Amino acid sequence: MIAQSVNLTEAFFFADFSHKSLSDEIRRIRPFSNKIIDTRNTNGATAKDYTDFIILDNMYQKAISSEETDVYVLFTGDGHFSSVCSFIKNIRGKEIWVYGVRNSFSRQLQDTASKSIILPTQQQLTAHNVSLVLSSLDTGEVSGSANLSKLISSVAEKNRVRPEDVKTAAAELTSKNYLTERTVTMRGGTKRTLLFVDWDKLGDDGVYERKKEASSVN
């Protein structure tokens, strides 16, 4: 994504790699960059985490000493980095792009950056939720006898995602006729609303491959 827009010359990775969850990350990072900065505090387990301060110090030093760099790219949503972004953009006259995680991205930081990119993008988010919707129907977690409203609430609750995001994904499916809601007349004249999925069309279009052959959804 970044390499398509700029000529990426350096990549720095900052973290306290003493944390158990990060202990194996250096091995994974090494093929991409040898500029790995371990920010661990050696003063003990209860010592303050200085990661942000170390990143800020390195950013200021780089911005001051590097005339040839035109674009800086930062991965964080922390509003504490607004000042250094402002310095890079307004004082040094360089571009600063910031990538942040959706719902954890400081508005001040977004406004300060030359360019802010929220991850996952709306397209990625919708694609993920489309997969959740189809998987729930495919595996029978939500039956074909459910209506669209019940499908949305069930997928949102089970996967702990926002109902409005699931609704967007369901709308994407219905707009392309992958998923339809139909009222059918049952025996005895009772009318019911059922969901129908065109699994063949989904497979042919490369949107979704079924996890099992049989399903309660038509």
Image (cartoon, rainbow, N blue to C red):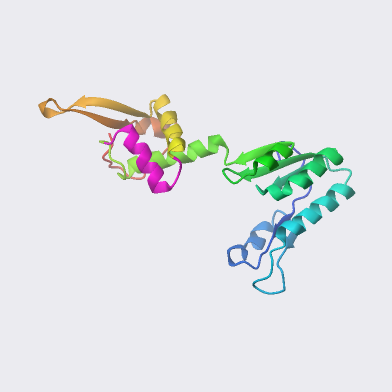
For the point 65% across and 68% down, the residue is 18
Inspect this view and state whether residue 112 appears. yes
The front one of 36 and 93 is 93
Residue 181 position, x and y percent, is 31, 28
Residue 217 position, x and y percent, is 28, 37
Inspect this view and state whether residue 210 appears. no
Image-quadrant location for residue 5: top right
The front one of 42 and 23 is 42
Image-quadrant location for residue 153: top left
* Residue 159, placed above or below residue 134: below
Check the image and name the residue furthest to the bottom.
44
For the point 45% across and 41% down, the residue is 162
Quadrant of the image containing the C terminus: top left
Q: What secondary structure prevails in the magenta region?
A: helix
**Label total for image:** 0
Residue 78 position, x and y percent, is 67, 49
Whether residue 199 is in magenta: the answer is no
Residue 174 position, x and y percent, is 39, 27
* Residue 30, placed above or below residue 148: below
Magenta segment, which residues?
A: 146-162
Whether residue 148 is in magenta: the answer is yes
Residue 9 horizontal side relative to residue 4, left or right: right
